[in-house]
Amino acid sequence: MTQVLCVAGARPNFMKIAPVMAALAETGIAAQLLHTGQHYDAAMSDGFFADLGIPAPDHHLEVGSGSHAVQTAEVMKRFEPVLDRVQPQAVLVVGDVNSTIACALVAAKRGVRVIHVEAGLRSYDRGMPEEINRVLTDQISDLLFTTEKSALSNLTREGIAPERVVFVGNVMIDTLHRNLARAVPAAETLGAELDDYAVLTLHRPSNVDDPGTLAALLDVIGEINRRVPVAVPLHPRTRGNVEKFGLSAKLDDLRVLPPVGYLEMLGLMRDAKLVLTDSGGIQEETTALGVPCLTLRENTERPVTIDEGTNTLVGPDPGAIRAAFEEVMANGGKSGRIPEYWDGRAAMRIAHALESWLPLRKGTRAAG
Ligand code: UD1
């Protein structure tokens, strides 16, 4: 009998589900893994399963890309029959992507309990598709595991009973701890030994879907690149838009890479002078690594990375990016401390909480 059906769908889910699957196996909780197929390129999906030792999914929905409505609806349609067949005691979802809300919603309507890992983060910006996914997933979750303390007050404000919320720390940092020694040295990924370099990741619709915004960002990155070489593992959405908007020349002098694997990215971040990003997870990983991070967004749902970590919220304005970059060049950037429970043990805390929460029957991982 499967106790927990775990869901992953897009790249940022994979580093979160890996330690959860391992901890469930270690505590003898019978789990199955379902991949929705929201991300499907080898570089966005399979590589992470291999690098992180995630067991092959027991179920694969192969939904692929589409508008938000189409992608979410496809996951829901294809998830329901699997859920009916498996009949788990609970469905566990991670993060805030479309696959997260889609599977949570199907489970909740079927009367299956929902567990949300990385609950309660809020940017308070409903223009972000992820914010809508977070708010709705938390509302229909029965058990909510949080990564930082700000999450509890966000959830309480939304009427979620504090008894349902458990502060466990950050499972993504479990993965970072587990793999840091295996990180691919930056020189190998960059094909050159560089004294100093920066890393840029950019994929948020608010930064890359408007030609003017994207062009202005690439211009200021071009300026930075003349001072410190900038490596850019390029997300498929961003690559597509750069080509569509005729901006390819702006990438010419940058060190553009295809989307890199987890171990490559870890090495790139660890050895960088600074990281510029609009990703959520990278704000947390740079804090864990002690590397200065300039976040090219107006807000963050991860305030502990600012209050305690190495993150600075800069926004998309070129002047502000320039000034923040100069600050890092002048004084080495912000140093921080490691937030509470970002200690590599978060997934084990989840598994232990589940031991008492699930009507447990010990067993091995069930076959698909
Ligand atoms: C999704 C998540 C976002 C996360 C990001 C990380 C949502 C709402 N967004 O955004 O939170 O930060 O993943 O990558 O769930 N594509 C490929 N190959 C792939 C996957 C996508 O080429 O394997 C291209 C397609 O053209 C697709 C586009 O990228 O249309 C966007 O993919 P999608 O999954 O819709 O959203 P992301 O921007 O990746």
Image: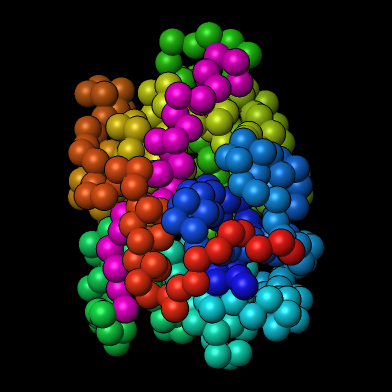
* 92 up-or-down from 234: above or below: below
What residue do we see at 28% from left, 39% from top? 310
Which stretch appears magenta?
164-189
Q: Position of residue 271 (x, y in %)?
A: 43, 21
Q: Position of residue 14 (x, y in %)?
A: 57, 51
Instruction: Give the mark count.
Output: 0
Residue nearest the viewer, comparing 270 with 243 = 270
Classify residue 244 as left or right of residue 362. right
Residue nearest the viewer, comparing 308 with 172 = 172
Q: Which color scheme does this rendered protein use? A: rainbow
Quarter of the picture holding the N terminus: bottom right
What residue do we see at 44% from left, 29% from top? 180
Residue 183 part of the magenta segment: yes
What residue do we see at 55% from left, 90% from top? 111
Classify residue 328 as left or right of residue 88. left
* 147 up-or-down from 165: above or below: above
Residue nearest the viewer, comparing 128 with 208 = 128
Classify residue 66 as left or right of residue 185. right
Q: Residue furthest front?
A: 362
Residue 219 lies in quadrant: top right
Q: Can the viewer see residue 134?
A: no
Residue 180 part of the magenta segment: yes
Classify residue 237 as left or right of residue 282. right
What residue do we see at 38% from left, 23% from top? 273
Q: Position of residue 102 (x, y in %)?
A: 62, 76
Q: Position of residue 44 (x, y in %)?
A: 68, 46
Q: Can the viewer see residue 188?
A: yes
Residue nearest the viewer, comparing 138 with 345 = 345
Quarter of the picture holding the C terminus: bottom right
Type of secondary structure dominating the magenta stretch: helix
